[in-house]
Image: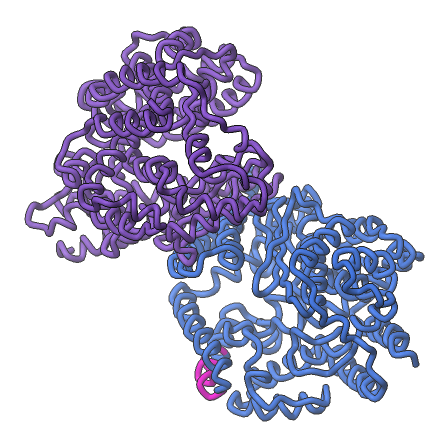
Chain colours: A blue, B purple
Amino acid sequence: MSSKSTLERLHLIDRENRHLERAVAVLRWDQETYLPEEGVEDRSEQLAMLESYAHERLISSETGNLLVEMGSTTDNPGGDEKLPVLERDFLKVFRRNYDRAVKLPNSFVSEAAKAEGLSQAAWINARRDNNFNAFLPHLTKMIDFSIRKANFWGFEKKPYDGLLNIYENGMSAEDVAAVFTPMGERLSAFIKKITSLPRPESSFLNREFDMEGQTHFSMELMKHLGFDCARGRLDVSAHPFTTALGSSDIRITTKYLLKHIQSGIFSTIHEMGHAFYEMDFPAELRGTCMADCSSMGIHESQSRLWENVIGRSYSFWEVMFPVLCSCFPGVLSLVPVDAFYRAINMVEPSLIRIEADEVTYSLHVILRFQLERELFSGSLDPADLPAVWRKKMKELLGVEPELDSEGVLQDVHWSMGAFGYFPSYALGNIYGLQFWDKLKSDIPRVEELVAKGNFTPIRSWLRDTIYIWGRRLDPQDLLKTVTGKTLSAEPFLSYIEKKYSGVYGF
Amino acid sequence: MSSKSTLERLHLIDRENRHLERAVAVLRWDQETYLPEEGVEDRSEQLAMLESYAHERLISSETGNLLVEMGSTTDNPGGDEKLPVLERDFLKVFRRNYDRAVKLPNSFVSEAAKAEGLSQAAWINARRDNNFNAFLPHLTKMIDFSIRKANFWGFEKKPYDGLLNIYENGMSAEDVAAVFTPMGERLSAFIKKITSLPRPESSFLNREFDMEGQTHFSMELMKHLGFDCARGRLDVSAHPFTTALGSSDIRITTKYLLKHIQSGIFSTIHEMGHAFYEMDFPAELRGTCMADCSSMGIHESQSRLWENVIGRSYSFWEVMFPVLCSCFPGVLSLVPVDAFYRAINMVEPSLIRIEADEVTYSLHVILRFQLERELFSGSLDPADLPAVWRKKMKELLGVEPELDSEGVLQDVHWSMGAFGYFPSYALGNIYGLQFWDKLKSDIPRVEELVAKGNFTPIRSWLRDTIYIWGRRLDPQDLLKTVTGKTLSAEPFLSYIEKKYSGVYGF
């Protein structure tokens, strides 16, 4: 085959792999939104079939041969240097996905999948029964499987680096620690200061906000932020998420709680941040493996930017608060906008990561990152996790759980063997503010635009500087390209200290 | 392989084929209900991929070899006579599906699929533009492809029999005509009589019925008829349909029109009739190819029985009319239940099949069946269809369309090459009343039960006498097994004549 037709064939395979991935995503989306209760069993079998077919296709020897024909190898994923840069990036991303799949022997994949299924089921029961010991053997097994996985894939210094690289390609645990450790210390100190001050009044957030009004306000948020409903939709699920079911079919979900208006509002904004990224990859990348996020941390930077930096800003509520009030006639009529602003920005160290505020959130992540490193270096015995968890929570956040179900058992990630994922969440905060600082230097009066409800310049900037790269750049390269700088928590920390000294008036 | 393990392997393949079919059905259901406008293009490609994979699997040589090992051939589909009858029925159904797929050469399948795509697109435009000649070359091609298809499959006497057998296995066009022709004459005469009488008042059906009320009433219908929402759901789509996405995931859709309350009500009941059949196959058949309808006509008998015989009966509205009124406070307050009953049973010859009432409906179908036979015997030139359509409409129903878009171009079926499908609709009416007569002899006071809102005995009877067979029996065998009789329109015609002489008071 000529090099041109080899490349065309690879593009076709890529496109078909993508369609298959998305068919799987449709079945998963349906499972989270509309699947009748008793349809779960058949659905699992349908998914297992499609996923194994997708895997088979991805690792086909034809694909491997075509990649080699193009000069793409693990060590030189981009292939022949004379190829146009876009094609080299295509090969680079394709080869990475291919390697991740093909390097794991089939027997290992099915053994791991089975163990993960059992482990998740055990975790659900263990969390319900607050019984860490019932989960411990599964956790140990998940760590073992993950080490084997890292060994199959290869890694720079330590197995944990190999796991981290699934979510944050090109970063080592040392790189992450170099930023997380001082960031954790500064946040802890700042939180001590804040919690010594009087708490803002926020009881009005727990009034009754009917579902019709909440649904209506989500629609208003989508309209104001410019979510294109011809290319996506919003539904409701137990755990909000974003999923791409096609290049022009990006779906988000949210969760409404009658007496906790923040849940619906900030889930909707958060998921829209993810969705904008997935929706606005440039036309030349659409339908290819390059129309994907640079990393999970970069994805998270987009959701957190919209949710927190924009969505919890005073300017944002200058325009949106009257709209919110109009969705709930009478309910918020005596609440001034700045009381609302302070209430939604209340800082309170708490036990559960997913309920944490913008300031304390990263500490929950840093805790998990530190524990993961120790688990994988062998310096922490999994059996000691509950005790170490309590000790570290006390140090970092000043609170400690009585029950393991509110401590070490709270997250699903470890039960699935998803070690190395947690750092993405806090990296999202860090990247987000580095991007925001750059955006502010390019659009100096951005807060004024936000206060007028004009989000178009922000969306265009994100599209033209970040989304435009898709998965072509690794996160550190993207950061450098967009901001000219290397990873630094300084913008995030300055933002936090400035914003919250305002909220708390010191 | 031992005969036992061969059979086990076939059951596994069957189960996997089923899962794959259902994954396809999920993507289709989503397309009709929730897919964002611009997601259509990717979705078509996703569907094409999955369908071609499902087809490949179905026709695999392994499957063919396993069937032969079990002694199952086209002429002896049930295989070895010593096998248990359930396994013989399994092989019979599996072999039939396999033969249907494998007898068509791949090149023919893809050529036909392409032509069907073009034909459907041409039909959409032709109907919009009222331009039959623009559609004519595609129609001719579809007839040609269908003849070739019938030739690949084989048929008893004529190619049209081969097409009819896809939907109504074991029936010939002669069998159908023997029943349809006298039925058409008797219906035409009866309609002439009715249309000479004063029309019942029905203007109140066109008052405004808000969507909340209509949605609520659908829920009430589901509750009263016993639709299990843990095993299915109701959504809204442009064209109401029923689809099985799993053994315990049967979904129906309906369509609400603000000023036409009948649309939502009778679509919901009709689709529930289909859904009950799909939901209540016996446990031993679930997940196999036998958990399927005997034929499209039998499927239609279930929907029409619930929609018309039960859902448009006076007894039904004795219990449901107060519920309906409570969903629309004030809107129907001065309407007595018998006025409502007469209004929903108004007979009026009209141009469009899908809007026809219970009495005139079968004539629309008989017209199409007669035209299809003539097209396939060569006695009717497709170019003459518009004129012949008008002439026959006048004869059968006493009305004739000015525009072809309201005549020969109204239905999608021919544009897809689905010749032989139409008879199912009227066969559904015929089977339905033969079943109902038997049901009434087994449950003599069934109308009293209906008037009390007790539908359980009807549902149990249908389950234990009809659904229990799944696809194990061909329609004529099922009819004989359930009723002890052969196909006859007499019960349907007697029912129509009795009911409507009551409605029209003569």
Q: Is residue B319 visible?
A: yes
Please identify the quadrant where the N terminus of chain B is shown: bottom left
- Extreme residue in the left direction: B82
Which residue occupies the foreground of this view, A254 or A212? Answer: A212
Residue at 63 percent across and 73 percent down: it is A422
Residue at 70 percent across and 64 percent down: it is A209
**Stretch of the chain drawn in magenta:** A132-142
Query: Up-down: is A185 above or below A498?
Result: below
Residue at 72 percent across and 70 percent down: it is A207
Q: Position of residue A153 (x, y in %)?
A: 53, 68
Which residue occupies the foreground of this view, B370 or A101? Answer: B370
Q: Position of residue A341 (x, y in %)?
A: 83, 68
Q: Position of residue B51 (x, y in %)?
A: 41, 41
Image quadrant assignment for residue A77: bottom right
Image quadrant assignment for residue B333: top right
Please identify the quadrant where the C terminus of chain B is shown: top left
Q: Is residue B406 left or right of residue A374?
A: left
Query: Up-down: is A371 above or below A256?
Result: below
Q: Is residue A16 visible?
A: no
Which residue occupies the foreground of this view, B75 or B415? Answer: B415
Determine if the magenta segment contains residue A137: yes
Q: Is residue B19 left or right of residue A261?
A: left
Determine if the magenta segment contains residue A291: no
Q: Main secondary structure of the magenta part?
A: helix
Which residue occupies the foreground of this view, A4 or B12? Answer: B12
Query: Up-down: is A478 above or below B499?
Result: below
